[in-house]
Image: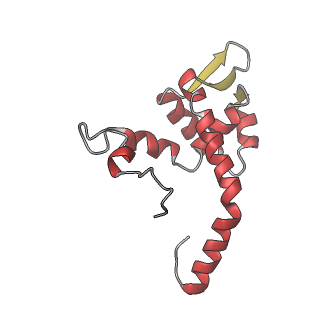
Amino acid sequence: MSPTHTAVTTPAELDPCGHQGHPDCGIRDVQDRLGDKWSVLVIVELAGGPRRFRELQRAVDGISQRMLTLTVRRLERDGLVRRTVYPTVPAQVDYRLTETGTGLTHLVKALADWSLAHRTAIADARHAYDLAHPGHDIR
């Protein structure tokens, strides 16, 4: 450790629960939702404002109709997305972030910025690992 390094991060400082209650104190549930393949991409798209279903589907590359339906329903259930049905024929539906969902946008942006800033280093590390461990099945 360098002589100028004075701040030490301890495990207690990293514990978001402060050792209260169950070890994961309910955050695993939320992290599972935000860590799935599609939720963050839908949140990113909705950060730009309300979107209709087909707009979301076109914007989130590779998502199927069924998976988008499940994703927005789960986000709605979690209180992150609001689904609004308009009384038209045919019915029009749009999706928008709730106040809680909007509170995630700065975190998602920070993660996206970090990902972009480190993508070359990560790609280089993966390449080096692959060379050092031929035949592995880690992806």
* 63 with respect to 101 (left or right): right
Tell me what residue is drawn at x 66 percent, y 40 percent.
109
Residue 63 visible, this orientation: no
Of residue 130 and residue 83, the one placed in the foreground of this image is 130
Of residue 9 and residue 24, the one placed in the foreground of this image is 9
Quadrant of res 102: top right
Quadrant including the N terminus:
bottom left
Tell me what residue is drawn at x 67 percent, y 72 percent.
124
Query: Residue lying furthest left in this view?
Result: 21
Quadrant of res 50: top right
Quadrant including the C terminus:
bottom right
Tell me what residue is drawn at x 58 percent, y 34 percent.
72
Of residue 120 and residue 130, the one placed in the foreground of this image is 120
* 77 with respect to 19 (left or right): right
Query: Residue lying furthest top in this view?
Result: 87
Q: Position of residue 36 (x, y in %)?
A: 52, 48
Q: Position of residue 24 (x, y in %)?
A: 32, 44
* Colour logic: secondary structure
Quadrant of res 81: top right
